[in-house]
Amino acid sequence: MAAPRTAPVRKVLGRLSLPERTFVADALRTETVGGVLLLIAAITALVWANIPALHHGYETVSHFHLGPETLGLRLSVAHWAADGLLAVFFFVAGIELKRELVAGDLRDPRAAVLPVAAALCGMAVPALVSTLTNLVGGGSTQGWAVPTATDIAFALAVLAVIGTSLPSALRAFLLTLAVVDDLFAILIIAVFFTARIDFAALGGAVAGLVVFWLLLRAGVRGWYVYVPLALVIWALMYNSGVHATIAGVAMGLMLRCTTREGEKRSPGERVEHLVRPLSAGLAVPLFALFSAGVPVSGRALGDVFGRPETLGVVLGLVVGKTIGIFGGTWLTARFTRASLSEDLAWADVFAVASLAGIGFTVSLLIGELAFEGDTALTDEVKAAVLTGSLIAAVSATVLLKIRNARYRRLCEDEERDDDLDGIPDVYEQDDPSYHLRMAEILERKAADHRRLAAEMAAARHGLAEVAGGAGDEDDRRA
């Protein structure tokens, strides 16, 4: 009787496929550079806003208004950064999400369960922690959504600064988490922070999106067509009352992210490759520059831990994110019969979960929307976001540094290319030609070693004869 067949056990956070690894490496490289710029912008904003001689200049620039008033677009510089520049960030997020859904990890429902469950738990638990903190402390629950977002760029900047060698599987997990996180953050903004709707403007924005989609379907190319159309769609979306960044997401989702015959990269990948540096290197840092400038003092920090609204944000980011993501990952592995990759331990998942507690860009945006009209509380919530993100970064640094020697060995294994064909050896273990190439290389090395051994043996033998002959001659003289 034949033994019953068992389904192979899936590995949680196992090694990526080579194409996915290449894509993730390219994406994270840009995000890391952008994250460092984001970090610099945040520090600059804090210094600019807290030095008495410079504070007035910061306020003047932030609140300087420009734009056509007749179109309802005479906005402050800070407002342009939040509603305008962040639309570029969400456009890239829309492309990333589309690619993950059609060509990445999220296209396979079995593989998508883990990051989706981890991201959902990583948003639900911080929201619950924030809400409970405010209910117990008698604070406002309006800011429940502030600690739900993860800032991938800031998290990667922390990794770059501390110099940890995080394996590609953990980096990819963090990136996919952030993509799903962004999707639900967009839904939160659209559903919970739309106070009024101008249906005429919204209808115009939808019509513009239809035209955008039809042009894409027709294969029309040229930035001079799409950029003006995108600006019109964005302006109509802004005037509709729906947050303008939704326009960026919608356009990103419309791009084709699968390749056709004769294409090396899909249109979505090409556009993302062009726009991502603009998003990571300009749009997000400028938003940070005009959003992170909050008063920092002993009293301000005391208020962060003394008010339920701000304490809820800190606890949500530091405690809620860690417990939510780690718990969601563990429960998914437990109930789907998946096992953790043998290269990793649950301590690694916990460390990455704590790193995901760095909430910056979207958290600051939601904080502004949640407490719009209350400038003092908005600034305090921003300070809470910065404080919680800093605590999460320090905690993650300690946890990741403990395992960094292990990570370094894993990264070296991932990068090793002994046959020098440009493909890491770990991806060629099932390829007979790889083993034949390695056999030739090792045979050449063995031949070189045998030749060197023979030369050394001959040289030593010659020296022994010379030494022995000299001794005999001396004896005869004696």
Image (cartoon, rainbow, N blue to C red):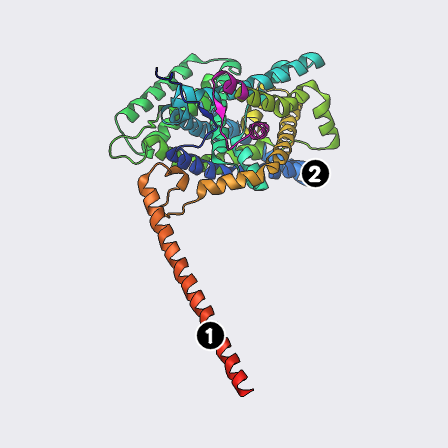
Q: Which residues are magenta?
A: 330-358
Does 314 sit above or below residue 264?
above
Which residue does the numbered mark 1 point to in the structure image? Answer: 465
**In the image, residue 468 lies at what x, y percent?**
50, 76
Is residue 24 or residue 36 the one in the foreground? 24
Q: Amino acid at mark 2?
A: Pro
State whether residue 78 is above or below residue 242. below
**Magenta stretch holds residue 335:** yes
Write down the quadrant of residue 201 in the picture: top left
Residue at left 64%, top 20%? 374
Q: Amino acid at mark 1?
A: Glu
Select label 2 or label 1 by which is in front. 1
Q: Nearer the viewer, residue 451 or 237?
A: 451
Residue 445 drawn in magenta: no
**Horizontal side, residue 431 vs residue 280: left or right:** left
Residue 456 is drawn in which quadrant? Answer: bottom left
Of labels 2 and 1, earlier in sequence is 2
Q: Position of residue 60 (x, y in %)?
A: 60, 34
Verify CB contact (< 8 Å) between mark 2 and mark 1.
Answer: no
From the viewer's side, name the closer residue of 285 and 329: 329
Whole-angstrom CA distance, mark 2 to mark 1, is 87 Å
Give the secondary structure at mark 1.
helix
User: Residue 275, how many percent across, how many down?
Assistant: 41, 35
Whole-percent x and y of residue 143? 61, 18
What is the crowding at mark 2: few (fewer than 14 residues within 10 Å), some, or many (at least 20)? few
Q: Which residue, given by chain and number where applicable, does mark 2 sit on?
A: 52
